[in-house]
Image (cartoon, rainbow, N blue to C red):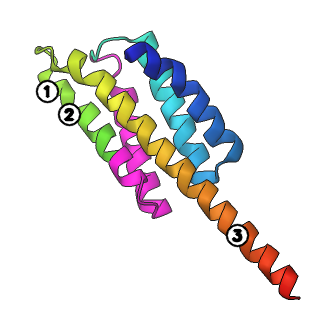
């Protein structure tokens, strides 16, 4: 399953970068940075801690700034990712790491679906307005 998540991650992030608004693009860059640095430092040791803190603060700021609902669970998942450092002697980090990666991916998918539906509604409204004249 972890291999599937890491195979789909760049595709979803590329879609968010291509078709998304500013919030989706920022979240996609944060997700790609998180995944890329997670591959460089595969275990949650203290060398990755400053990176995770920075990403957590960025996701929380994005959630406060954007007022999009899907950014709230994405920020909460980053808080969970940072909180796991308290349990780094236990194997909970290795077990839950893929779950958080999958959760962040699901948040991006929800954001993309919301953006696409908003884009379709805007296009339909413009079509109706031009037809009515």
> From which residue to which does the magenta span run?
46-74
Give the mark nearer the N terminus: 3 vs 1.
1
Residue 34 falls in image quadrant? top left
- Of the two numbered discs 3 and 1 in the rendering, the one whose residue sits closer to the viewer: 3
Q: Quadrant of the C terminus?
A: bottom right
Is residue 37 in view? no
Picture residue at 42% right of the left edge, 46% below the top: 59
Mark 2, Cα crowd under 10 Å, few <14 / some 14-19 / many 20+, is some
In magenta segment, residue 109:
no
Which secondary structure, mark 2? helix
Q: Which residue is mark 2?
A: 83
Indicate the position of residue 4 as horizontal and vertical percent values. 45, 18
Which secondary structure, mark 3? helix
Indicate the position of residue 106 as horizontal and vertical percent values. 42, 40
Indicate the position of residue 71 as horizontal and vertical percent values. 42, 52
* Residues marked 1 and 2 touching at CB (< 8 Å): yes
Q: Is residue 65 left or right of residue 90?
A: right
Which secondary structure, mark 1? helix
Q: Which residue is mark 3?
A: 122
Position of 65 relative to 24 (above/below): below
Q: Which residue is mark 1?
A: 86
Picture residue at 11% right of the left edge, 14% below the top: 89
Q: Is residue 23 left or right of residue 121?
A: left
In magenta segment, residue 69:
yes
Picture residue at 45% right of the left edge, 11% below the top: 40
Gap in Å between the C-alphas at discs 1 and 2? 6 Å
Q: Quadrant of the N terminus?
A: top left
Position of 25 relative to 41 (above/below): below
Position of 94 relative to 10 (above/below): above
Residue 72 falls in image quadrant? bottom left
Picture residue at 20% right of the left edge, 33% below the top: 83
């Amino acid at each position: 399953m972890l291999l599937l998540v890491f195979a789909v991650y760049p595709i979803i992030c590329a879609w968010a970068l291509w078709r998304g608004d500013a919030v989706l693009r920022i979240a996609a860059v944060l997700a790609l940075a998180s995944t890329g640095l997670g591959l460089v430092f595969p275990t949650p040791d203290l060398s990755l801690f400053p990176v995770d803190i920075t990403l957590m603060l960025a996701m929380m700021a994005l959630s406060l700034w954007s007022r999009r609902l899907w950014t709230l669970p994405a920020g909460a998942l980053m808080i969970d990712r940072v909180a796991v450092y308290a349990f780094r002697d236990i194997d909970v980090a290795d077990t839950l790491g893929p779950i958080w990666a999958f959760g962040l991916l699901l948040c991006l998918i929800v954001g993309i679906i919301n953006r696409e539906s908003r884009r379709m509604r805007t296009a339909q409204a413009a079509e109706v307005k031009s037809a009515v004249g």
